[in-house]
Amino acid sequence: MRVATAADVALMLDWAAAEGWNPGLGDAAAFRAADPQGFFVAEVEGAPVAAISVVNHSDDIAFLGLYLCRPDHRGQGIGYALWQHALAHAGGRTVGLDGVAAQQANYAKSGFALAGSTTRYSGALDAVADPDVRPLREGDSAALAALDEAANGYARPAFLSAWLAPDQTRWSVVLEAEGAICGVATARLCREGIKIGPVIAPDAEAALRLARAALAAAPDGAEATPEVMIDLPEASADLAAQLQTLGFAPTFATARMYRGPAPQAGTTLQAIATMELG
């Protein structure tokens, strides 16, 4: 078992794609920038066969994701040994995860408790430019960090800096009201379709404005992509209802679990960034 390289992290996302997780095209670099020492692989005869991430976002919070084992090496204890090895990286931090519901009992054996759920909604959404929504600018970082911390209940500066950095496959927009930033949304090209998240906004109506404006700000050609995916925490019932009215349907769900005291997410967290890193 060892720390994953950049090439390993790219391979991990290939495995995730094979499992139907549909990661973003530019996710690998942003994920690894959050905590380069927080990605691990297990090797057999020199080849990676299992992987996991336990990213330390702050002195108090870590997030577990990308827990994968090649089908031909399952049932041998390799994945669980790597799980234990990686969790040691978090030390005494609270650790969160978004796991498939069928694995809840297994995660509970490691001290994780159910705190809610995350549901992916998929559908078609019109791209609509909004006069109050604009692209990110230099100087927005402090305001966006404050919004993100208030929404999630913890700070994640390294991840946020990498996530919001300019990328050919990922872009972000902000919502302004009375000259101040009150919302933000990121959209990214995925193996299939476009994912929008995080979406931080004062209410579901503002969240939809941000999502539509994010699509309107897409690179040439991307706006024609038919499928849009948004991953909603359980508390985003209003946004879920509005999306379903527009024809969106739930297509995938995970259990949000924590080992240790769960952070208190704010009411502005309308959609999470990724099921892999929260």
Image (tube, rainbow, N blue to C red):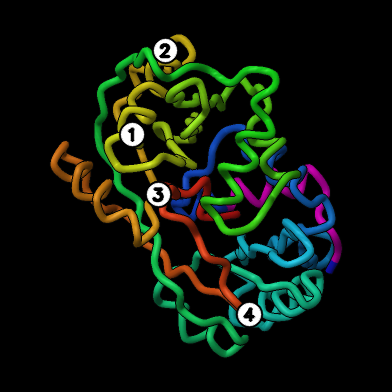
CA separation in Å, label 4 and label 2: 44 Å
In the rendered structure, does residue 96 fall within the stretch colored magenta?
A: no
| Residue 102 appears anywhere in the view | yes
Q: Secondary structure at mark 2?
A: loop
CA separation in Å, label 4 and label 3: 24 Å
- Determine which of the numbered discs, if any, sits on residue 70 in the image: none
Label 3 belongs to which residue?
231
* Comparing labels 2 and 1, the label whose residue is closer to the camera: 1
CA separation in Å, label 1 and label 3: 16 Å
* Comparing labels 1 and 4, the label whose residue is closer to the camera: 1
Q: Secondary structure at mark 4?
A: loop
Crowd rating for badge 3 (residues with CA inside 10 Å; few <14, some 14–19, many 20+): many
Q: Secondary structure at mark 3?
A: strand
Give the number of callouts: 4
Label 2 belongs to which residue?
221
Label 4 belongs to which residue?
260
Q: Earlier in the sequence, mark 3 or mark 2?
A: 2
In the rendered structure, does residue 13 fall within the stretch colored magenta?
A: yes
Looking at the rendering, the stretch of residues picked out in magenta corresponds to: 2-15
Q: Is residue 192 above or below residue 46?
A: above
Q: Nearer the viewer, residue 126 or 137?
A: 137
Report the quarter where the N terminus lies.
Answer: bottom right
Identify the residue shown where x is 60% and y is 64%: 68
Q: Give the main secondary structure, helix, strand or loop, of the magenta stretch.
A: helix
Label 1 belongs to which residue?
206
